[in-house]
Image (cartoon, rainbow, N blue to C red):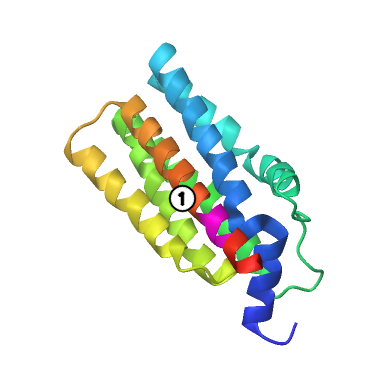
Amino acid sequence: MNTISDAQRDMAAAYVGGAGGAFASAAAWLSAALVSTLIGATAGIVTLVVAGMMIFPVSILISKALGATGKHSKGNPLAPLAIYGTLWMVMSILIALAAAQYRTDWFFPAMLLVIGGRYLTFETLYGMRIYLAFGASLAFTAIVLVVLQAPAAVGAYAGALIEFTFASLILASARKQSA
């Protein structure tokens, strides 16, 4: 790969611009929302953490179902950014869990902030500016949820809705770029 743009195109082609991951994440958030509604906030928190561990493998399956390879080229210089971003996110889950110790309803907004911050790095990873709006939407929603003192399930449903909406927009954009 000669340029960052080449590396970004490779990533976008391999993972449909990251749409597969956003759809998988939307499913994790929706699962957590349903569990929070039916069982309780703590069970919803556990659901998001456990389902979150499945996002990457599920995203690969979705990417392949959408016609992509689900694997970037060997030696892509952006691969470490994806790995380090994932590690930062995993470490940041501890912050969200600490917030939940103080107030359970703050877990999902804290996770929206963590994931929103991670999506900001995807603008560089995929070369798609939509990730700036994606990350900002998650962060703004987190703040609104805390200010309104929304119940935990509302935060999880909000995460699911935003993830699904942006996954759909990213998929449409990735398909348009590859056409």
Asked whether 13 or 120 is in front, the reply is: 13
User: Could you classify mark 1 by the number of other residues whose Cα lies within 10 Å: few (under 14), some (14-19), or many (20 or more)?
Assistant: many
**Residue occupying the far right of the picture:** 74
Residue depicted at x 48% and y 42%: 164
Q: Along the horizontal axis of the image, is 133 left or right of 4?
A: left
Task: For residue 84, say whether it is visible.
Answer: no
**Relative image position of residue 100 (x, y in whole percent):** 36, 32
**Residue occupying the far front of the picture:** 179
The residue wearing badge 1 is 166
**Residue occupying the far bottom of the picture:** 2
**Residue occupying the far left of the picture:** 148
Asked whether 97 or 71 is in front, the reply is: 71
Assign the magenta stretch its main secondary structure: helix
Task: For residue 168, say whether it is visible.
Answer: yes
Q: Quadrant of the C terminus?
A: bottom right
Q: Does the magenta stretch include residue 24?
A: no
Q: Quadrant of the N terminus?
A: bottom right
Q: Does the magenta stretch include residue 171?
A: yes
How many marks can you see? 1
Asked whether 169 or 69 is in front, the reply is: 169
Q: What residue type is labelled 1?
A: Phe
Mark 1, secondary structure of its residue? helix
Q: Is residue 172 above or below residue 176?
A: above
Q: Along the horizontal axis of the image, is 109 left or right of 92?
A: left
Residue depicted at x 59% and y 31%: 50
Query: What span is in magenta?
Result: 170-174
**Relative image position of residue 127 (x, y in whole percent):** 55, 72
**Relative image position of residue 67 (x, y in whole percent):** 75, 51
Q: Is residue 168 above or below residue 34?
A: below
**Relative image position of residue 76 (x, y in whole percent):** 74, 73
Residue depicted at x 62% and y 41%: 55
